[in-house]
Amino acid sequence: MNFEFIADRPVLDFLSTVAERGTSDDEKLQSEQDLADWIKQSGILDTAPPVTKQALERGKALREATFRAGGTWGDFADWMRFGR
C-alpha cells in the first residue's frame, strides 16, 4: 500500500492511517505488511522490522490513544499502557 505523507510530522501522518474519521473510518492498516510499508515509506527507518499481528494491534492502539489525547495529556491509562 502507498501512503500519503503531507503533515511534515510522522505522528500526524500516522494518525491519518484512519481516513474519514467519524464517517466511514477507513482503516489503512489492514495487515502487518501495511504497517511495515508505512514504516518504510515514512522514512523513520530505512528497513521496516518484522511486524507481527501483536505489533500491528499495539500500533493501532497507540495511534488511537494519541488521537484521543488530542494535544492534551488525555487518559492517563492510555499513556501507562505504552510505557511498559
Image (tube, rainbow, N blue to C red):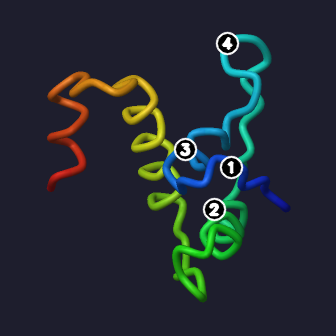
Local crowd size for mark 1, using a 10 Å CA cut-off: few (<14), some (14–19), many (≥20) = many
Q: Which residue is mark 3?
A: 12
Q: Amino acid at mark 2?
A: Leu
Q: Residue furthest front?
A: 8
The quadrant where residue 69 appears: top left
User: Which residue is at 53% across, 53% downward?
Assistant: 9
Q: Which residue is mark 2?
A: 35
- Viewer-proximal residue, 48 or 50? 48
Q: How far is mark 4 from mark 3, CA to CA? A: 17 Å
Q: How far is mark 4 from mark 2, CA to CA? A: 22 Å
Question: In the image, 81: left or right of 33?
Answer: left
Which is more N-terminal, label 1 or label 2?
Answer: 1
Question: In the image, 22: left or right of 2?
Answer: left
Which is more N-terminal, label 3 or label 4?
Answer: 3
Q: Amino acid at mark 4?
A: Gly
Q: How far is mark 1 from mark 3, CA to CA? A: 15 Å
Tell me the element at label 1: loop
Q: How far is mark 3 from mark 2, CA to CA? A: 15 Å
Q: Which residue is mark 4?
A: 22
Q: Which disc is residue 29 wearing?
A: 1
Q: Is residue 62 above or below residue 66?
A: below
Which is more N-terminal, label 2 or label 4?
Answer: 4
- Residue 74 horizontal/vertical position (percent): 25, 23
Tell me the element at label 3: helix
Q: Are marks 2 and 1 in contact (CB under 8 Å)?
A: yes
User: Which residue is at 47% across, 41% downward?
Assistant: 63
Number of callouts? 4
Q: Are marks 4 and 1 in contact (CB under 8 Å)?
A: no
User: Which residue is at 68% across, 49% downward?
Assistant: 29
- Residue 46 horizontal/vertical position (percent): 59, 88
Which is more N-terminal, label 1 or label 4?
Answer: 4
